[in-house]
Amino acid sequence: MSSEMLSAFIETSNVERKQDVSENQEERQKPSSNDVTEPVSKRQMKKLMKQKQWEEQRELRKQKRKEKRKRKKLERQAQLDSSSDGNERKRVRRQVAQSNLRLIIDCSFDELMALKDIKKLHKQIQRCYAENRRALHPVQFYLTSHGGQLKKNMDENDRGWVNWKDIHIKPEHYSELIKKEDLVYLTSDSPNVLKELDESKAYVIGGLVDHNHHKGFTYKQASDYGIDHAQLPLGHFVKMNSRKVLAVNHVFEIILEYLETRDWQEAFFTILPQRKGAVPTDQACDHSSHGKQSPRAEGGASGDSSEGVNSRLEPSSAAPTDIKQALKK
């Protein structure tokens, strides 16, 4: 075979080899008949819509918090201006009137919660503590049945809790600390509706973050213990697109706000998160009479406490800066 023929043969072989490699690459790049995109489930679609709505309402929540801080600042400034005392810090503290009302977070549900929900409850308790520290009418704050996973999580992630002030943290059950006739368990399943807060009573909030796995549990427990129970008058003032289930800290803050304003409606609308889609009941009636329906908010009802316990505090994964500052006090 001549050198010319040999060169032509080698060149032809190389071209054929390149063509085979190219065809193999094209075959690999073609989508397999088995690679069919799975349809999005209804549950996943709800999660996506909820996440979208949460992001859209971020600025609204931020503005609301900003307005509340501004209002509190103006109130404190007005208190300073109206006082003739030379010490400004003393003038502010003099306006704080400690309430006799006892507010208890019942932490006896440790075994019913996963660790992630224990951590959410811890964040809610942090917020309750911070809000009570800066309230104009702080309550007598109790944490009862404190132990187990919750205490371990607090020891590991928030060692400063041992230095918290103006709070009673007890390993005992609330029934061992408070007289039975003074107790009122707050639960959205109760047929009794609160009209006023009796400051001689001790109101219990169930510290249970369970995503509705134990619906009605706190109501049953209160009934079994034979203690009084009631729900906040949410339905009398508010129409919501989601279940009447609130986070521990929401219930706590609503009570603090009511002690300051003595107005349930103002307390609800100051504290309720935007995602609850809350409107005053009279406005809701007006909408329905015109045949209009407000958009449904997929509220993250996920707990059973006083008005329920919803672990998703608007929650950011960490306490806001102002709360962290309050925790250091």
Image (spheres, grey):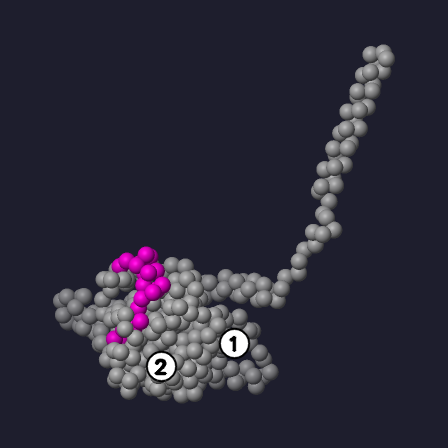
Position of 141 compared to 246: left or right? left
Residue found farthest to the left:
86
Task: Give the number of callouts.
Answer: 2
Depth order, front residue of 221/229? 221
Rendering quarter of residue 10? top right
Position of 218 compared to 24: left or right? left
Residue type, numbered disc 1: Asn
Q: Residues within 10 Å of mark 2 (few under 14, many from 20)?
A: many
Residue under the point 63% across and 61% down = 40
Secondary structure found at label 1: loop
Residue under the point 32% across and 63% down = 151
Residue type, numbered disc 2: Tyr
| Residue 262 highlighted magenta (yes or no) | no
Position of 39 compared to 248: left or right? right
From which residue to which does the magenta span run?
Answer: 139-160
Residue under the point 58% across and 63% down = 44
Residue 307 visible within the image: no
| Residue 148 highlighted magenta (yes or no) | yes
Rendering quarter of residue 209? bottom left
Residue 3 visible within the image: yes
Q: Residues within 10 Å of mark 1 (few under 14, many from 20)?
A: some
Query: Which x, y percent locates residue 67?
Result: 37, 67
Secondary structure found at label 2: strand
Rendering quarter of residue 9? top right
Residue holding disc 2: 185
| 244 lies above or below 27 | below
Position of 295 compared to 329: left or right? right
| 288 lies above or below 115 | below
Residue under the point 72% across and 52% down = 34
Q: Name the quarter where the C terminus is drawn.
A: bottom left
Give the foreground label among 2 and 1.
Answer: 2
Query: Which x, y percent locates residue 207?
Result: 37, 72
